[in-house]
Amino acid sequence: MLGLGVLWAQNADVWLKIVSNQKTVLAVPDLRGSGAAQNFMGAFNDTLFSDLQNSGFFDMAPKGMYPLQVPQRPEDFRQPARPGASSGGLWLSDWASPPVSANYLATGYAAEQDGQIVLYGWLFDVAQPNLANAQILGKRYFGSVDEAGARKVAHEFAADILAHWGGTSLYGTKIYFQSNRTGHKEIWSMDPDGSNQKQITSFKSISIMPAISPDGSKLAFTSYASGNPGIFILSTETGRRLPFYNQRASLNATPDFTPDGKQILYASSASGYAQIYVANLDGSNLKRISSSRAIEVEPKVNPKTGTDIVFVSGRTGPQQIFRMNFDGTGVERLTNGEGEASNPSWNPNGEMIAFSWTRGFATGNFNVFLMDVASRTYSQLTHGEGRNENPSWAPDGRHLVFMSTRNGSHQIYTMLADGSQVHQLTTAGDNRTPVWGK
Amino acid sequence: MLLKRKSSVIWIAIVLAVFAVGCKKKAAPPPPPPPPPKAEVAPPPPAAPDIAEFSAEPSSIERGQSSTLRWSVSNANQITIDNGVGTVQASGSRSVYPNETTTYTLRASGPGGALSKTATVSVTAPPPPPPPPPAKAPLSERITALQDAYFDYDKSDIRDDARSSLTKDADLLKSIFQDFPDAVITVEGHCDERGSAEYNLGLGDRRSTSAKEFLVQLGVPTDKLKTISYGKERPVCTESNEECWQRNRRAHFSTGQ
């Protein structure tokens, strides 16, 4: 079953496939607002800066190094009298040269116009000798005259800047997770920056381990609301429960959607040990996929191929990550048998998984790892700051949301796939098993 | 009586002598009293009745029990015992069932006289009845006597200590199902906090199933036991040490969710 010739090796460069360490230096001065817009520029500037910083594409030039004058629009630029001289911030080279040493400058301003906030946003390549070649982006964005409107236009401006580097904004994506803050474990959602936390379920039972359909329209999870743990599916649009046939078993749990969104894989004890099954979205037409006398849970279908499945199994001893074909053949272990491994999550590229592993630590002390599935080289992203579990890839394929106990309680964090830019998103109650969806 | 009469004659003589000395000139002394009438020779008087025995044995009974009166009388031609016994022979016995303390009087009479004697039978109230059997304890209380079965880390095999707990549980369960024929008892499987939450759902399921299978082998009806895994979702304690971990690696009994 296991290829003896396979060399398992830790390779710190696994994440370099997705997060380059050669980063663009970006200068983003605080933008100013006129009229009512000025009241919301704090929220605007925080949002713009953090979206760009968290994207992982940039090294943010420190604000303290910026020139005194900031060009707010193309008309503000003043070429210096002689080449090499300074314009006090009003020329491209003032931003390209030390101490800023930026490659790009994002600037603009906001105003109130016709009852809306209007943001004028520009992006300049400050290495260019003339303004006409330097302007990369110049666009207007509209939002309501309040903090939410200011954040919206900031997210949109950041998304357009990211797109220039081929990045995908996470603005508008949702993180689903379980929280006990009401006294019961319920499913909640929030924005990728932790704002807008909303309770989705109200079963007052145990509802845990959410999964989100590829298009973001359906939420599947495990719940005790009908007695034994079973699979529930909700429409994220209406909040209504959709029908799902739970086969007769003491346990139906850990659902996930296939990449086409048409089927659900899950673990069921219908035949004894929890094993992997696949069924239609309503639970019909179910088929058993795996076949072992071991506990097998957490099936995840490769989002690119749609044909291979990673899952967690105890078939060789302590829980490890395995892969198999959709028909249950070709089972191979991906982790090398050390410690316990769980919570696999496919990167959208279909080549890499994030997972949690106790390798090198005491039983139960999981850390987040990445593995290039083809080569089985892996890279460790967290290093014993409490337990770190349930990594789930963001739709941009560059960020992970995960659960950590590093600050004492179980909370949700995001980070870049190289382990940097760690942000805590939750504080209230005990929050676990996040999943990042569209 | 003869002696008395003689002394009175002497006394009279003395008195007369004194008078005679003192009053010489007195008249003639009175005539001597007439001789006492000559006593007739009477037949010997009849013997008086005699009650040799009148007893109650035992002398103290509980209400509803009997006591035996025994008597033995002589020289009587009429013997009665009151309190409903009536006329009896000169000797005999009779069982009596007095409801309360009663003094029986035996009266014997005959030519020689009448005599009576009593015998008392003390009647004590019987002890109050024993309390009725205790009311049937509710099911939720009965199952608290069922012992948890404990497991090793990442294992669902029944250990020796769990074997002994479950063997006792099997007897208790059978008796519970006799008293509560409609009851169904849930075997919960639990895990410690260390393994992943997802895998532990599967592990708790194995633990509840192993415990159930063991009980069924010991004769507990399979359809009376259902299983549920709580994984590590409902820990009994939350400390991160082996003592608490062991307490959570268990099969536990409940009446349902």
Image (cartoon, grey):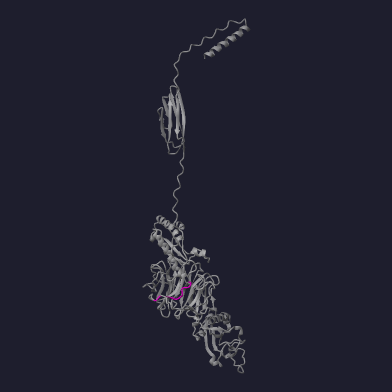
Inspect the magenta stretch and tell me whether residue B92 lies in it: no
Quick check: can you spot residue A224? no
Q: Where residue A152 sits in the image (x, y, percent)?
A: 52, 80
Near-viewer residue (B42 or B202): B202
Q: Is residue B41 above or below residue B254?
A: above
Q: Main SS of the magenta segment?
A: loop
Left or right of A78 in this view: A290? left
Extreme residue toward the front, this view: A5
Near-viewer residue (A224 or B25): A224
Q: Is residue A22 above or below residue A366?
A: below
Magenta extent: A330-339
Extreme residue toward the right, this view: B22
Q: Is residue B150 above or below residue B47?
A: below
Left or right of A269 in this view: B36? right
Q: Where residue A143 sits in the image (x, y, percent)?
A: 52, 82
Quick check: can you spot residue A56? yes
Inspect the magenta stretch and tell me whether residue A335 lies in it: yes
Near-viewer residue (A78 or A358): A358
Q: Where residue A92 sits in the image (x, y, percent)?
A: 58, 90
Quarter of the view holding residue A81: bottom right
Q: Where residue B217 sits in the image (x, y, percent)?
A: 39, 60
